[in-house]
């Protein structure tokens, strides 16, 4: 189940995760059915969940559209319906479920450590949503990592684009208005935000890393086509899909 408002196979995370899932299922004699429910993102209606009874199990790929409440509601409905399921990505609750994901707080802290080690003190964070759990934990880890070195991440260096390219440009214009006040490094929360940053740099005639250093949290191999090739903290999305266990 892929609760996603965008076309599924245009999203590299979804495509890579599905490839990993399929590689494991094929070896065990199962078929993969892809179901993208309509309606509010992040949760399924009871009729849709009951329809899943005709499958052997459900893998729910949480996406950036899901809030914490969306995920918790879905877990409660699946458990009540006694449907076997597993989840991949962006779960931060305490329910005893089968889940594969990454520690986004640790990724944020690692980003801070990496950038500070290279002499950066004015660091900015570009994210898609202020309510998206993954980005909330990234911010938490980033601030904690910077605090270890006596540095802060002020609110005016946290940009929330709502995944709109034009909004990203407005935020970046504010950061680059003066040479003295601009960040020396920008950490981007995912692939799409990294692309928006690269588009901005090209449109404004700026260079990486001469004008600003860039560090991205990305899906494995997704930044290979960008030039200069970005420094990144890569998420092993294919392996995340192949590691899932449904019970």
Image (cartoon, grey):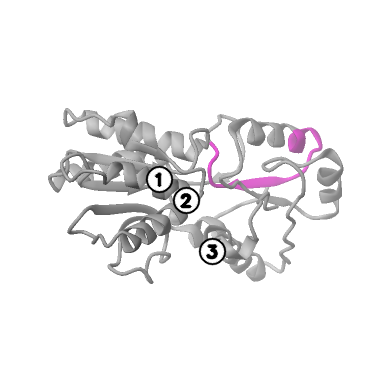
Nearest the camera: 164 or 190?
A: 164
* 3 vs 1, front mark: 1
The picture places residue 28, in percent across and down from the top left corner, at 67, 67
* Contact flag, marks 1 and 2 (Cβ < 8 Å): yes
Task: Residue 99 in the image: state x and y as whole percent.
Answer: 57, 44
SS at badge 2: helix
Q: Nearer the viewer, residue 27 or 65?
A: 65
Picture residue at 70% right of the left edge, 32% below the top: 73
Relative side of 88 to 168, left or right:
right
State the residue in front, 56 or 209: 209
- Helix, strand or loop at disc 1? helix
In front: mark 2 or mark 3?
2
Specify the label residue 170 is tagged with.
1
State which tag comes first along the sequence, 2 or 3: 3
Q: Quadrant of residue 227?
A: bottom left
Q: Does residue 19 belong to the magenta stretch?
A: no
Relative placement, left or right, of 153 versus 121 is: right
Q: Give me the residue at 39% from left, 39% from top.
A: 159
| Residue designated by label 3 | 16
Q: Residue at x 79, y 32 (%)?
A: 80
Residue 80 among magenta residues: yes
Task: Give the alpha-carbon distance from disc 3 to disc 1, as whole Å.
Answer: 31 Å
x, y percent for residue 233: 34, 53
Q: Residues within 10 Å of mark 3 (few under 14, many from 20)?
A: many
Secondary element at image label 3: helix
3D distance between C-alphas at marks 2 and 3: 27 Å
Q: Vertically, is 18 above or below 107? A: below
Q: What are the residue bounds of the magenta stretch?
A: 77-91
Q: Which residue is mark 2?
A: 166
Residue at screen point 17% across, 42% down: 116
- Name which of mark 3 and mark 1 comes first in the sequence: 3
């Amino acid at each position: 189940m892929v609760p996603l408002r965008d076309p599924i196979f245009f999203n590299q995370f979804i495509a890579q995760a599905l490839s990993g899932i399929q590689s494991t299922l094929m070896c065990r004699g199962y078929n993969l059915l892809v179901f993208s429910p309509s309606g509010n993102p992040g949760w399924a209606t009871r009729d849709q969940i009951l329809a899943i009874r005709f499958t052997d199990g459900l893998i729910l790929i949480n996406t950036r559209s899901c809030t914490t409440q969306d995920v918790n509601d879905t877990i409660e409905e699946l458990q009540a319906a006694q449907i076997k399921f597993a989840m991949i990505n962006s779960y931060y609750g305490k329910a005893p479920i089968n889940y594969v994901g990454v520690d986004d707080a640790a990724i944020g802290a690692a980003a801070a450590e990496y950038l500070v080690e290279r002499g950066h003190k004015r660091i900015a964070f570009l994210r898609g949503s202020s309510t998206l759990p993954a980005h909330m934990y990234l911010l938490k880890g980033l601030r904690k990592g910077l605090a270890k070195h006596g540095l802060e991440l002020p609110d005016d260096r946290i940009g929330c684009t709502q995944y709109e390219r034009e909004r990203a440009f407005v935020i970046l214009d504010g950061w680059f208005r003066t040479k003295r006040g601009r960040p020396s490094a920008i950490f981007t929360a995912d692939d799409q935000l990294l692309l928006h940053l690269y588009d901005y740099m090209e449109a404004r005639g700026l260079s990486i890393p001469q004008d600003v250093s860039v560090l991205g949290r990305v899906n494995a191999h997704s930044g290979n086509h960008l030039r200069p090739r970005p420094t990144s903290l890569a998420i092993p999305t294919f392996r995340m899909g192949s590691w899932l266990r449904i019970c």
